[in-house]
Image (spheres, rainbow, N blue to C red):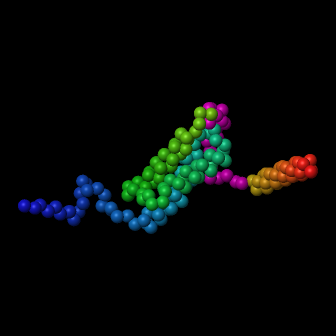
Amino acid sequence: MTATIETPLVPGPVQGPTRTVQDPARDGQLVEALLLDDYRALTRLAYLILPPSLRRSQRIATAHRVVQSAVPAGLSLPIRDPRGYLRRRVVQEAARQAAERSFLDRLGSVFAPADPADFDPCAIDLDHTAIVRRCQRGRQVSLAATAVFAAGVLAALLLMS
């Protein structure tokens, strides 16, 4: 005697969600749309979770990296509450980044100044003149170091002959 089990036409609560096969292209578009809509809020959340002992620029870059890597390729979003899922992923990744600090980094966060409450890591304006000045200063230092090194090599060659 054999028993056959037929699946019902309307899935019940025991069988789980009705959408089992997901379209990867549609999921990718949904992820992009959610990230674009919530990017500022997710970046600010990651920035606030990261330790203040990091320099501000390093915290901002890490917060952006955390948000951008919140959903790795090939990972599909859940059917229910994809925004909450993204927030949880950002919080987990930022907490993981914060936990990977050494003891000295943790000690430094005690003395680090706090950012103002209205600070927005996505609204940083770049000071192009400061960047140009820094690059010029770096070039001058590298030219001076190269000249000193070349003079040392030349002096060593002259002393050997």
| Total marks in image | 0
On screen, residue 7 above or below 100: below
In the drawing, does residue 16 fall left or right of residue 119? left
Residue 26, by quadrant, is bottom left
**Residue 129 visible in the picture:** no
Question: At 66% across and 44% down in the image, what residue appears?
Answer: 56
Q: Which image quadrant: the N terminus? A: bottom left
The percent position of residue 116, horizontal first and vertical second, equals 64, 41
> Depth check: 147 or 110 in front?
147
The front one of 99 and 57 is 99
Along the line of sight, the residue nearer the viewer: 92 or 100: 100
109 horizontally vs 157: left or right: left
The verdict on residue 87 being magenta is no
Q: Answer with the quarter of the image where residue 132 lies.
A: bottom right
Span shown in magenta:
105-126
Image point 44% across, 52% down: which residue? 85
Q: Residue at x 47, y 50 (%)?
A: 89
Residue 118 % position (x, y): 62, 45
Residue 77 screen position, x and y as percent? 42, 57
Q: Taking 106 as reference, is 3 left or right?
A: left
Q: Identify the residue at image location x=23%, y=63%.
A: 10
Q: Is residue 98 above or below residue 149?
A: above
**105 versus 72 height, above or below:** above
Say if 54 sits above or below 124 in the image: above
Residue that lies at the very extreme toward the front in this rendered image: 161
Question: 146 or 90, which lies in front?
Answer: 146
Q: Is residue 152 visible?
A: yes
The prevailing secondary structure element of the residues shown in magenta is loop
Residue 161 x %, y %: 92, 51
